[in-house]
Image (spheres, rainbow, N blue to C red):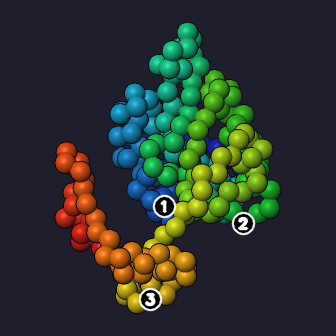
Amino acid sequence: SMQLEFLKPSDARWTQQLARIPHQFYHTPAYCQLEAERKGGTAEAMLVTEGDNVFFVPYIITSLEDHGFPSDDLYDLQSPYGYPGPLMQIVTNGFLKAALQSWREAMRCRKVVCGFVRLDPLGQGTPNEFAELGVVQLRGTTVSVDLQQESVILWRQMRRNLRSSVQRAADRRLTFCMRRGSDIDASAITRLH
């Protein structure tokens, strides 16, 4: 049967769950606790399991009174800064939809009236089931580059029009310059190029 549990950062099950499923540091209890302190909220994670199916989400709960609303018994849910989107291990059709519905109902009972969950742009995509809960806002394409590869391989992996633009810039001897008072570390940029 499906089980829904709320975990505090001190709960060993939070760390145990992360040991079983690929994750980022944004999902760790220490990071969520740090962000909760910064935002004046409470760190928490929700874990839904059913057999081998897992749905895990870390988030921060804040009082809407902190946002200017007159009631102190209504709450907001938001992802910690970064990309601590849901971690999912789904082996059964229909599990995600049921897990999301259970989570929504549990949050409703706890007087959480709105939520903002940032999805990992390199993660498991955006299942249609999320759109049934509310608005899913796409914010463009994320590109990842393995900088440990040789430059020849990286060059070949670039789109032809991008390679042409880079070559034209090199042919024109375009250079990088910074304005006075900029807080950008030019030596770091130079090392990257």
Q: Nearer the viewer, residue 27 or 109?
A: 27
Q: In the rendered view, tell whether residue 2 sits above or below residue 155.
A: above
Report how far apart the C-alphas of labels 1 and 2 lie in the structure.
18 Å
Label 2: state its secondary structure: loop
Circle 2: residue type:
Val
Q: Where is residue 50 in the image (x, y as percent from the top left)?
A: 70, 55
Q: Where is residue 59 in the image (x, y as percent from the top left)?
A: 51, 41
- Give the label, 1 or 3, closer to the camera: 3
Q: Name the residue under label 2.
A: 91
Q: Mark 1 points at which residue?
A: 23
Q: Nearer the viewer, residue 68 or 12?
A: 68
Q: In which quarter of the image is residue 173?
A: bottom left
Label 1: state its secondary structure: loop
Q: How crowded is mark 1: few (under 14 residues within 10 Å), some or many (20 or more)?
A: some
The C terminus - image quarter: bottom left
Q: Residues within 10 Å of mark 3 (few under 14, many from 20)?
A: few
Report how far apart the C-alphas of labels 3 and 2 lie in the structure.
36 Å
Report how far apart the C-alphas of labels 1 and 3 lie in the structure.
28 Å
The answer to whether mark 1 and mark 2 are in CB contact below 8 A is no
- Return the residue found at the far front: 172
Q: In which quarter of the image is residue 43?
A: top left
Q: Name the residue under label 3.
A: 153
Circle 1: residue type:
His
Q: Nearer the viewer, residue 4 or 166?
A: 166
Name which of mark 3 and mark 2 comes first in the sequence.
2
Task: Please tell me which residue is depicted at 44% across the width and 44% down the height of the picture.
Answer: 81
Circle 3: residue type:
Ile
Q: How crowded is mark 2: few (under 14 residues within 10 Å), some or many (20 or more)?
A: few
